[in-house]
Each structure stands twice: as structure tokens, then as C-alpha cells.
Amino acid sequence: MQKESQRLLVAAGGNLPLRGDPPEKTILQAFHLLETRGLRGLVVSRFYHTPCFPAGAGPDYVNAAFAACVPPEVTPSEILAMLHEVEAELGRTRDTRWGMRTLDLDLIACDDLVLPDAATQDDWRSLPAETQRIAAPDRLILPHPRMQDRAFVLVPLADVAPDWCHPRLNLTVAQMLAALSTQDRDEVLPLSV
């Protein structure tokens, strides 16, 4: 029996205004645009204020996450292309890795898929921090290989999918979040709007 849909987890963030609007407004626009492109059952986290990474590289970020469903025939590559289209429509340029941006939409997970394979996902997940800064995969890696290290991803994801279980780590979002340092978790603060 074929599944009726597949569940996506997406992290969203931005630290530059778009046409004078703050990043949280751009993120909300992205959610609406994604719904018009076929995402269903969109469940959105609260918005969070997060220090810029690396420190001093620009304005602080607004982060959020969402869970949604798409038909099973839509591939993860097609989903990623859709996310990139919405980013571009809302002013994102890909000039600098980890640079300032109006919008960043990262496909974190698609059901319990491991792409392109378990060994490659494990290799990217275990890269040393200094290598992470200079190396970028040439294909989609799922689950996102840095998700377990990033409070700005896990805090919002805990709002919408605390029980989603990482298929390689066998840990839920809530468990991965609890494993982070208190300092990392405390840097991600609910945004007052």
C-alpha cells in the first residue's frame, strides 16, 4: 500500500530585511508561497531570535521551523528545488556560504529517508568543525548532517516535531535538543512580536 503523503521538516531563517520588512515577515511569506506550491498541513513553530553565526558576521537571525506534507511522488530533490525557488523569489542570493540572507530554507528531513545512503550521511554528519566551514556536499544529504548540532534548528523543530526520530542516530528531536549544552539552547530565544 502506497503512503498518501510524506512528511517534511524544514528549518527557516533570515537576518536581512526584504523591502523594509523584518525577517519574520519574509519567513511568513515563504510559508504562504510554499502552500501555493503544494505543501499541505503546514505546522509552524514559534519564531526565535538567534545570534549570528559566526559571531559578529552580521545581524542576528530570526529562526523558525515547519512540518508539512507533500504527495509521495514528489522527490526530495524536487522539494529542495521548490525551497530554493521560494528563497530566490524572496531575495535570497547564494554569494557566500553561511553569509547574511533574507531567507534560508533548509530541508532537514523527509520522513525517515537517508540520502544518498547511510555511509555518506554518516560521513557528512561526523565531519570535524573546521572541515564543515570549507566543505559543502555536491548532493542532497538527508537528514541534514548538522541538525543535531544546531540549537537554532532543534529549538524550533521541537515545537512542531519533538517526536520525529533521526533514522541514523535513533534519537528524537527532543532528545537531540536535550543533548546540546545549556548555553547553546539558551541562545535561542522566543521572538517578541
Image (cartoon, helix red, strand yellow):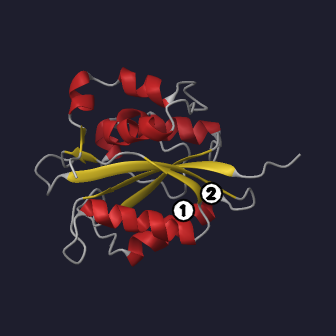
Residue 81 visible to the viewer: no
Asked if disc 2 and disc 1 are in contact, CB closer than 8 Å, the reply is yes
Q: Classify mark 2: helix, strand or loop.
A: helix
The numbered mark at residue 164 is none
Q: Is residue 61 left or right of residue 123?
A: left
Residue 128 in which image quadrant: top left
Q: Which amino acid is tagged 1?
A: Leu
Residue 51 visible to the viewer: yes
How far from the left and from the top, in percent, is residue 192?
20, 47
Circle 1 crowding by C-alpha within 10 Å: few under 14, some 14–19, many from 20: some
Mark 1 lies on residue: 80
Mark 2 lies on residue: 76
How far from the left and from the top, in percent, is residue 88?
40, 75
How far from the left and from the top, in percent, is residue 150?
34, 38
Front-most of residues 45 and 80: 45
Residue at the outermost left position: 56
Work out whether 33 lies above or below 59.
below
Residue at the outermost right position: 1
Q: Which amino acid is tagged 2?
A: Pro
Residue at left 14%, top 57%? 59
Residue 12 in which image quadrant: bottom left
Quadrant where the N terminus sits is top right
Q: Is residue 140 left or right of residue 69?
A: left
Residue at left 25%, top 38%? 188
Q: Is residue 145 left or right of residue 164?
A: left
How far from the left and from the top, in percent, is residue 148?
42, 33
Front-most of residues 65 and 191: 191
Mark 2–mark 1 distance (CA, rounded to whole Å): 6 Å
Residue at the outermost front position: 193
Work out whether 111 lies above or below 88.
above
